[in-house]
Image (cartoon, helix red, strand yellow):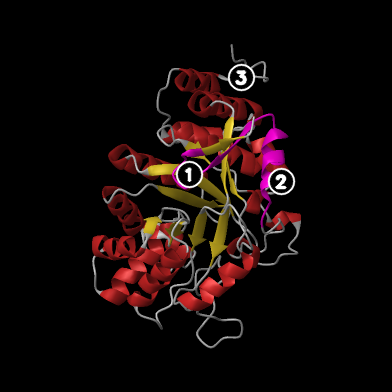
C-alpha cells in the first residue's frame, strides 16, 4: 500500500490524496494549493502513484532529429532568442534540397521522426512550408514528420487566406503526421500581452489542436513556465488542455517546459529551481488525469533531474534529438542531444524500463 514519507500531512493534502487515490478530478483550488505547498515528497509520490497506474515502470523515448528550415520571424516574443529579422546576421531560410543535404550529412541510423519548427517567416509563401515537408517526405518516406506548432499553423492561415482545416489538410497531403506542441507558452491572453507573445492567442492555439485531432492527428502540447505567470495561470492552463482532451482525446503527452534565461551564463537565480521543476512535473501528472504521458524534457531541466522526475510522474524523456537550437539559443546549458545508449542508461539508472517508441507511442523495443 502506498504511504507518503511525510508523516503528518494537513487536512487539505489528505483530501487531495483521497481524491487522487479514488480517481477524482482535481480542481483549480487543489492545483494552486499543491503549488503553494512545501510538501514536495507527498506531491511527488502521489504523481508517481498515478503514473504507475497508467504506465507501470515503462519510460518512453524516440530517436528523433530536430530540424529548423528558417529562423526568420515576424514575431518578437519576449522570451525568444532564436528568431532573426530578414537580412540580419545569422538569419537563414533553407530550401527543401538544402535541408535534405543537411539531413543526409547528420542523420543517424534509427531516426524515426523529424521534429520541425521554425520562425514565422512572412517573406516566403505558404507553399514554401508545404514544399519543405513534401521534399523531406519524398526523400525519407519512413521517417515521421512531426512539424510546426499551432502558432505556426495560425500564421499560415494569415499568409495563405486558408482556414485552419484547409492548411492542415494541405500539410497532411505533403506528409505531415503530427503537430509539435510548442506555441502554447501560458494559455492566458493577459500573460501573452505582457510577454509580447505576437502569435496565436489562446483560442487559436486550442482550435488548431482541436482541428488537428478532428483530422485524425495525435499531438503533444506544452506549457512554458517560470516567468511572470502565477500558479493560478499554470493550473488554468492545464485545465484548458484537460477540457480539450475531454472533447477530442487527441493529446498523447503534456510537456512542461522550464523557461530558459537569454544568457547561457546567467546565474542560478535567473533559472527555475530543481524544486520548481519537479513540482511542476508532478502537479501536471496530477491535474492532467486524461493525458497518457507527462514528459521530462532533459534539454531544459538536465539529465540527472530528468532521472529524478521519473519518480515524480514523468513517463517520457523525449528522445535522442540532434543539435537542438530553440532552448539552447535561450540559454540552456544541457547537451544538445543524447545517444540511444545514454537514454537507455538514463532510464535504467532511475530504476525504470526504457521503451523505444514511435511518434504515436507504439512500442518499438523494450529494453528490459
**Magenta stretch: residue 350 in it?**
yes
| Percent coordinates x, y for residue 323 in the rendering | 64, 63
**SS type, badge 1:** strand
Q: Which residue is mark 2?
A: 342
Q: Nearer the viewer, mark 2 or mark 3?
A: 2
Q: Which residues are magenta?
A: 337-363
Residue at the extreme top: 1
For label 3, count other residues whose C-alpha is less than 10 Å away and answer few (under 14), some (14-19) or many (20+).
some
Left or right: residue 311 versus residue 147 is: right
Q: Nearer the viewer, mark 1 or mark 3?
A: 1
Residue at figure coordinates x 70%, y 42% from the top left = 305
Mark 1 touches mark 3? (CB < 8 Å)? no
Query: What label does residue 9 carry, if any?
Result: 3
Quadrant of the rendered image containing residue 331: bottom right
Residue at figure coordinates x 57%, y 31% from the top left = 58
Q: Quadrant of the C terminus?
A: top right
Mark 2 touches mark 3? (CB < 8 Å)? no
Quadrant of the rendered image containing residue 335: bottom right
Amino acid at each position: 500500500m502506498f504511504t507518503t514519507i511525510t508523516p503528518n500531512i494537513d487536512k487539505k493534502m489528505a483530501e487531495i490524496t483521497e481524491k487522487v487515490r479514488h480517481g477524482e478530478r482535481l480542481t483549480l483550488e487543489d492545483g494552486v494549493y499543491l503549488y503553494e505547498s512545501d510538501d514536495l515528497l507527498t506531491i511527488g509520490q502521489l504523481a508517481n502513484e498515478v503514473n504507475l497506474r497508467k504506465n507501470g515502470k515503462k519510460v518512453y523515448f524516440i530517436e528523433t532529429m530536430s530540424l529548423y528550415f528558417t529562423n526568420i520571424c515576424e514575431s518578437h516574443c519576449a522570451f525568444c532568442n532564436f528568431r532573426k529579422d530578414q537580412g540580419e546576421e545569422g538569419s537563414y531560410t533553407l530550401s527543401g534540397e538544402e535541408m535534405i543535404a543537411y539531413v543526409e550529412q547528420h542523420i543517424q541510423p534509427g531516426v524515426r521522426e523529424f521534429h520541425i519548427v521554425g520562425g514565422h517567416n512572412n517573406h516566403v509563401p505558404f507553399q514554401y512550408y508545404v514544399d519543405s515537408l513534401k521534399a523531406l517526405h519524398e526523400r525519407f518516406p519512413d521517417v515521421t514528420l512531426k512539424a510546426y506548432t499551432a502558432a505556426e499553423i495560425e500564421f499560415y492561415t494569415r499568409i495563405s487566406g486558408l482556414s485552419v482545416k484547409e492548411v492542415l489538410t494541405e500539410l497532411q497531403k505533403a506528409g505531415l503526421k503530427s503537430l509539435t506542441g510548442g506555441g502554447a507558452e501560458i494559455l492566458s491572453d493577459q500573460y501573452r500581452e505582457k510577454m509580447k507573445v505576437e502569435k496565436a492567442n489562446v483560442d487559436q492555439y486550442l482550435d488548431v489542436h482541436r482541428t488537428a485531432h478532428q483530422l485524425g492527428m495525435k499531438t503533444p502540447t506544452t506549457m512554458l513556465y517560470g516567468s511572470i505567470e502565477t500558479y493560478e495561470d499554470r493550473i488554468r492552463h492545464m485545465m484548458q488542455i484537460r477540457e480539450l482532451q475531454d472533447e477530442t482525446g487527441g493529446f498523447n503527452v503534456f510537456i512542461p517546459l522550464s523557461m530558459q534565461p537569454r544568457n547561457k551564463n546567467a546565474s542560478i537565480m535567473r533559472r527555475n529551481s530543481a524544486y520548481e521543476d519537479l513540482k511542476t512535473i508532478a502537479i501536471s501528472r496530477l491535474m492532467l488525469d486524461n493525458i497518457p504521458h507527462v514528459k521530462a524534457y532533459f534539454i531544459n531541466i538536465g539529465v540527472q533531474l530528468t532521472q529524478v522526475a521519473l519518480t515524480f510522474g514523468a513517463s517520457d524523456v523525449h528522445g535522442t534529438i540532434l543539435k537542438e537550437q530553440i532552448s539552447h539559443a535561450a540559454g540552456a546549458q544541457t547537451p544538445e542531444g543524447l545517444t540511444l545508449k545514454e537514454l537507455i542508461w538514463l532510464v535504467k539508472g532511475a530504476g525504470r524500463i526504457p521503451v523505444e517508441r514511435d511518434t504515436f507511442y507504439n512500442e518499438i523495443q523494450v529494453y528490459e
